Image: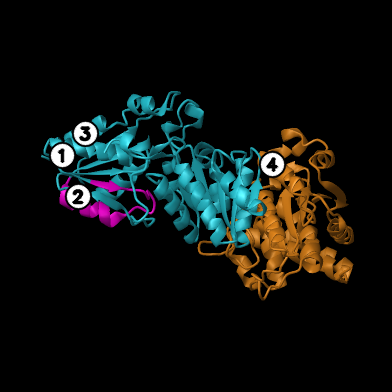
């Protein structure tokens, strides 16, 4: 399966479609945006339901507080901005006004990761999984494609409490189908194998599929798990994989400090420790470039995943 | 217009609340004395006159909302809520103790508390959200949000001020406890707020200035604010930090400390004397 055979759609588009669907189904769904209405796809909801759309200007802290107030009144607000401005700039507002109150606010952080591309470091969110998952009450979801993003959006509305959705700007391969099972908190095993387990989220699920193809040609059977929910993490699936495969690789378009890999390691280290390598951003800020160039630059490629897999296999012996 | 309660009754209530605040803080051994004492009349006039509320059914959807954005002044809010019957007055003596719902800064879950607060600058945005949602649902409630003057150092306050005027939230009334002191000293020396009236006006708000310890004037200002349509109103309440206790009034060092036992007794004597004068 190569990228040329797959449809390329940004995950934010799936979110935008999900919002419109929710708007039709539930009149309590409202959408807020901090001046990034087109970019976040909040505009698609605004067009259909202008009375339930609220622009807050370039004021993320105010937007999340406003969303919290609406949630206290029984609304289901989706507050939309870029991931950096959501998870970083408004972190204390999310902590106190949303998570501490368990306010039913859904946070849509688009433009996650280096695949933002030419805008560079200030706009490439590499820390959201860490920043959000350390907050009590918070759920964090990183869909692997546009179809999963739409499902995650619909599922998020069913959860009572705050949810952070990490979405991407750039077109990415559509690797799941409408009929595929998806539930927040339940990891999806995409390929079975006994030699090692590769955990991935977001676009790295696709890159990991390619890595599995390479490994298979070399006689290595890797289990591939789409870990779309870094929090609450699917402990059972991790522990089972630790027992059955005995070696882990995590792959994320995100800093390895506190991200998906850390979340998995926290479970494994306390339940059934196995050798592990983390593929992700290594203590660096992003840089400008095209998404494909940046994946190469930061080592988020099937080739690097294969190298990590071989290292854990050696460590396992 | 609603019938106003007897003013002597309210004045007595304010003194009783002050006494409870001092006892609570003394028992707790820590907390914010000055900024709690400065907002007593603001709360008494709201809770005993203006707010549509029901202590027996605190989550009644048709209630007016009061949001304490300056969360550190929660001893005053807790005392007023207890006097109103939201929870037993005995609970006041558990302030800041392990297991008490009377947290050092307010936490959602205690009857009558509408928001968790304590990290300054966040309440007005939440108030906007409540006011917008109420309007969307055609709910004729009013939303009140009390801020500190030092709190207006926070940029988010002004983001929220812009939002409220942009959306013409005339169901919203902000109140600034203008006691002129913050933890590091006089507001004008820490970071001069300048002319607060002009600042709020330039953000599109109607501004009322009032003596924040004059119960009658406060009630007038709430009624006046309700009549102003097409924009939000802020009441700048001129107050004295530490009001009611001679040795606490206007003393910056009383921002974030609780009275010691002897200090509390001395303060209670002063307040009892004030009560006797009223009788």
B209 vs B161, left or right, is right
Asked whether the beta carbons under mark 4 and mark 1 sit within 8 Å of each other, the answer is: no
* Alpha carbon distance from label 1 to label 2: 11 Å
Chain letter for the part of the structure drawn in orange:
B
**Image disc number at residue B159:** 4
Work out whether mark 3 precedes mark 1 in sequence or the reverse, and give the earlier one: 1
Asked whether the beta carbons under mark 2 and mark 3 sit within 8 Å of each other, the answer is: no
- Residue A276: x %, y % from top left: 23, 40
**Chain containing the residue with disc 3:** A
- Residue A280: x %, y % from top left: 33, 34
**Circle 2 SS class:** loop
Chain A visual colour: cyan
Q: Which of marks 3 and 1 is in front?
A: 1
Q: Which residue is drawn at 42% across and 31% down?
A: A114
A289 vs B249, left or right, is left
Asked whether the beta carbons under mark 1 and mark 2 sit within 8 Å of each other, the answer is: no
Asked whether the beta carbons under mark 3 and mark 4 sit within 8 Å of each other, the answer is: no
**Image disc number at residue A306:** 3
Crowd tier of the residue under label 1, counting other residues whose Cα lies within 10 Å: few below 14, some 14–19, many 20 or above: few
**Circle 1 SS class:** helix
**Residue occupied by mark 2:** A192
Is residue B258 at all visible to an observer of this figure? no
| Camera-nearest residue between A98 and B267 | A98
Residue A179 quadrant? bottom left
Same chain shared by disc 3 and disc 4: no
Residue situated furthest front in the rendering? A5
Which image quadrant: the C terminus of chain A? top left
Q: Which of marks 2 and 4 is in front?
A: 2
Q: Residue at x 35, y 52 (%)?
A: A233
**Residue occupied by mark 1:** A216
């Amino acid at each position: 399966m190569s990228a040329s055979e797959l449809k390329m759609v940004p995950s934010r588009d799936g979110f935008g479609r999900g919002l419109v669907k929710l708007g039709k189904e539930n009149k309590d769904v409202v959408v807020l945006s901090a001046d990034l209405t087109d970019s976040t796809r909040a505009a698609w909801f605004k067009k259909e339901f202008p009375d339930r759309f609220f622009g807050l200007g370039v004021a993320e802290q105010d937007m999340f507080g406003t969303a919290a107030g609406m949630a206290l009144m029984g609304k289901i607000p989706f507050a939309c901005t870029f991931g950096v401005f959501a998870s970083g700039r408004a972190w204390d507002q999310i902590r106190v006004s949303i998570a501490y109150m368990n306010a039913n606010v859904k946070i849509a952080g688009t433009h996650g990761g280096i695949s933002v591309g030419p805008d560079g470091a200030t706009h490439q969110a590499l820390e959201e999984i860490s920043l959000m998952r350390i907050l009590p009450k918070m759920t964090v979801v990183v869909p692997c494609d546009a179809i999963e993003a739409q499902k995650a959006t619909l599922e998020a509305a069913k959860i009572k409490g705050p949810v952070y959705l990490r979405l991407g700007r750039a077109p990415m391969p559509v690797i799941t189908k409408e009929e595929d099972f998806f539930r927040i908190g339940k990891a999806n095993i995409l390929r079975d194998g006994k030699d090692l387990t590769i955990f991935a989220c977001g676009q790295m699920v696709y890159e990991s599929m390619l890595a599995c193809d390479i490994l298979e040609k070399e006689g290595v059977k890797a289990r591939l798990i789409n870990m779309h929910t870094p929090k609450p993490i699917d402990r059972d699936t991790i522990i089972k994989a630790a027992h059955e495969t005995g070696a882990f690789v995590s792959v994320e378009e995100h800093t390895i400090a506190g991200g998906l890999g850390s979340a998995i390691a926290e479970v494994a280290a306390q339940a059934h420790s196995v050798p592990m390598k983390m593929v992700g951003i290594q203590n660096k800020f992003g840089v400008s470039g095209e998404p494909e160039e940046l994946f190469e630059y930061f080592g988020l490629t099937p080739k690097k995943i294969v190298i990590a897999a071989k290292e854990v296999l050696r460590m396992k012996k | 217009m609603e019938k106003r309660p007897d003013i002597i009754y309210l004045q007595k209530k304010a003194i009783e609340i002050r006494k409870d605040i001092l006892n609570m803080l003394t028992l707790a051994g820590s907390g914010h004395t000055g900024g709690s004492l400065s907002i007593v009349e603001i709360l008494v006039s709201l809770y005993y006159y203006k707010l549509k509320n029901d202590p027996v059914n605190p989550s009644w959807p048709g209630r007016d909302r009061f949001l304490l954005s300056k969360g550190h002044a929660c001893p005053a809010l807790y005392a007023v809520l207890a006097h109103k019957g939201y929870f037993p007055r005995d609970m006041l003596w558990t302030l800041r103790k392990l297991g008490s719902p009377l947290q050092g800064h307010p936490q959602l879950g205690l009857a009558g508390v509408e928001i968790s607060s304590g990290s300054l600058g966040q309440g007005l945005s939440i108030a906007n959200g409540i006011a917008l949602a109420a309007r969307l649902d055609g709910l004729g409630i009013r939303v009140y949000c009390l801020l500190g003057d030092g709190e207006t150092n926070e940029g988010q306050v002004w983001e929220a001020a812009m939002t409220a005027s942009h959306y013409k939230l005339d169901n919203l009334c902000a109140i600034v406890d203008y006691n002129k002191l913050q933890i590091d000293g006089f507001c004008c020396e820490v970071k001069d707020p300048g002319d607060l009236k002009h600042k709020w006006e330039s953000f599109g708000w109607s501004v009322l200035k009032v003596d924040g310890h004059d119960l009658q004037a406060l009630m007038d200002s709430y009624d006046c604010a309700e009549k102003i349509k097409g924009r939000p109103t802020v009441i700048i309440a001129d107050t004295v930090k530490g009001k009611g206790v001679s040795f606490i009034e206007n003393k910056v060092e009383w921002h974030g400390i609780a009275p010691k036992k002897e200090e509390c007794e001395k303060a209670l004597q002063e307040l009892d004397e004030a009560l006797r004068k009223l009788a």
